């Protein structure tokens, strides 16, 4: 391995003292490939196994914590009968590889699909539809419904511990339910759950407390709790970078083990605050100021890209499309074969790359997102 890439393989200590063997993380990506009973499929397990060697952490696709929060066909479910034994198959494989297994826990909120939730009723912080699906009017959650979902995040954490995961990542990003409560676009309530920036923060904070309480009850002090967030929204009103810095300060105070900023490009700047000259990764990193490790993600393809991403003052870099296309990305870098990291893939490479059929079909339909060469 070239000496300059040594920084990618430094160990990093999380807030709880757990050491991660290197700075490279597999980003959470939807697979659309769970079994019909809501459990993880054998195809998914093989897909993760094929990509796990050498990683510091592997963050799974998001698992649904509540029946009214399923947002994707084939999403696996924390409440499914038989979830634990199937997930144990995955965690045992990852432990053999020495990779930390992180389960992303999620509720779709107004991004859930009516055909996948009970009675077709989609729920959210309020009744404002997402601009992506303007004809689907969500049902505003009442106190009872909110408390039930908070408990579901705790139950999903307990399930993850039982299944042998090393941690969970709370999915507070990408316009799903947790972000919907924090957002002034989707949350226009005037009760304890909304009406001000401070009140919009209550739901995410309560979920963190519930998850951390589940960990405390388990007695597993090494169990990792991370949190993923999106730094801004394009809607008006919407989350802006100043809101996110307020969120980040509160997340840091919760003593989470890591934070994970969700971006399309590590170096992207704010599109809603054009006078800000630094990248959003840099702005968030400066706010954190070393108090908790930060994962960044987005358009990191080569090993040199990864080094540049670390220069944004992040502690970890997450690989998404790159690990889809090059499952042995780490081995190539370690063995002086980084020049073999390909920039495109064949439309006939599904079996070779060990990608679930439904995921590969979705990739073929993602115009411009995946660089196919034929």
Image (spheres, rainbow, N blue to C red):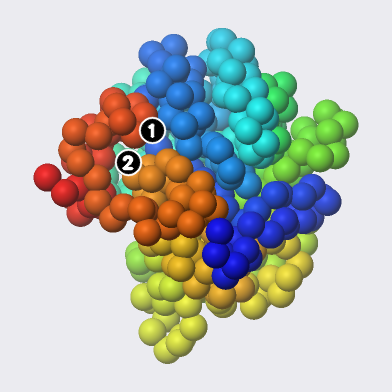
For the point 79% across and 47% down, the residue is 18
Instruction: Say which quarter of the image contains residue 362.
Output: top left
| Mark nearer the viewer, 1 or 2 | 1
For the point 56% across and 15% down, the residue is 86
Foreground pick, 193 / 53 = 53
Q: Position of residue 232 (x, y in %)?
A: 45, 66
Q: Earlier in the sequence, mark 1 or mark 2?
A: 1
Dot 1 alpha-carbon crowd within 10 angstroms: few under 14, some 14 to 19, many 20 or more: many
On screen, residue 198 versus residue 363, left or right, reads right
Q: How many tags in the picture? A: 2
Quadrant (top left/top right/bottom left/bottom right) for the N terminus = bottom right
- What is the secondary structure assignment of the residue under circle 2? loop
User: Disc 1 marks which residue?
Assistant: 31
- What is the secondary structure assignment of the residue under circle 1? loop
Position of residue 195 relative to residue 146, above or below, is below
Dot 2 alpha-carbon crowd within 10 angstroms: few under 14, some 14 to 19, many 20 or more: some
For the point 87% across and 31% down, the residue is 219
For the point 77% across and 62% down, the residue is 253
Position of residue 83 relative to residue 291, above or below, is above
Foreground pick, 319 / 265 = 319
- Asked if residue 147 shows in the view, the reply is no
User: Disc 2 marks which residue?
Assistant: 137
């Amino acid at each position: 391995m070239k000496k300059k890439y040594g920084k990618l393989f430094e160990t990093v200590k999380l807030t709880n003292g757990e050491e991660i063997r290197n700075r490279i993380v597999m980003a959470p990506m939807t697979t659309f490939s769970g079994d019909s009973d809501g459990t993880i499929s054998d195809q998914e397990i093989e897909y993760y196994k094929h990509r796990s060697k050498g990683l510091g952490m592997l963050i799974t696709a998001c698992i649904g914590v509540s029946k009214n929060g399923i947002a994707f066909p084939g999403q696996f479910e924390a409440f499914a009968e038989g979830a634990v034994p199937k997930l144990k198959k995955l965690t045992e494989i990852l432990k053999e590889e020495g990779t930390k297994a992180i389960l992303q826990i999620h509720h779709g909120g107004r991004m859930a699909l009516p055909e996948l939730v009970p009675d077709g009723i989609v729920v959210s912080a309020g009744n404002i539809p997402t601009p992506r699906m303007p004809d689907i009017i969500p049902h505003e959650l009442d106190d009872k419904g909110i408390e039930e979902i908070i408990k579901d995040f705790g139950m999903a954490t307990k399930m993850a511990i039982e299944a042998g995961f090393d941690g969970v990542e709370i999915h507070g990003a990408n316009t799903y339910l947790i972000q919907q409560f924090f957002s002034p676009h989707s949350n226009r309530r005037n009760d304890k759950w909304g009406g001000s920036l401070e009140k919009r923060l209550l739901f995410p904070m309560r979920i963190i407390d519930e998850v951390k309480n589940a960990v405390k009850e388990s007695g597993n002090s090494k169990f990792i709790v991370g949190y993923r967030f999106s730094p801004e929204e394009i809607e008006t009103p919407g989350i802006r970078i100043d809101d996110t810095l307020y969120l980040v300060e509160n997340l840091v105070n919760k003593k989470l083990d890591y934070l994970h900023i969700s971006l399309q490009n590590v170096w992207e700047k704010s599109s809603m605050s054009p006078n800000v000259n630094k990248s959003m990764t840099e702005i968030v990193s400066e706010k954190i100021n070393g108090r908790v490790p930060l994962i960044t993600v987005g358009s990191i393809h080569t090993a040199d890209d990864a080094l540049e991403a670390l220069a944004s003052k992040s502690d970890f870099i997450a690989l998404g499309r790159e690990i889809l296309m090059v499952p042995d990305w780490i081995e190539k870098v370690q063995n002086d074969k980084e020049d073999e990291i390909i920039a495109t893939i064949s439309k006939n490479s599904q079996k070779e790359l060990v990608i679930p059929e439904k995921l590969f079909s979705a990739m073929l339909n993602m115009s411009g997102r995946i660089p196919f060469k034929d």
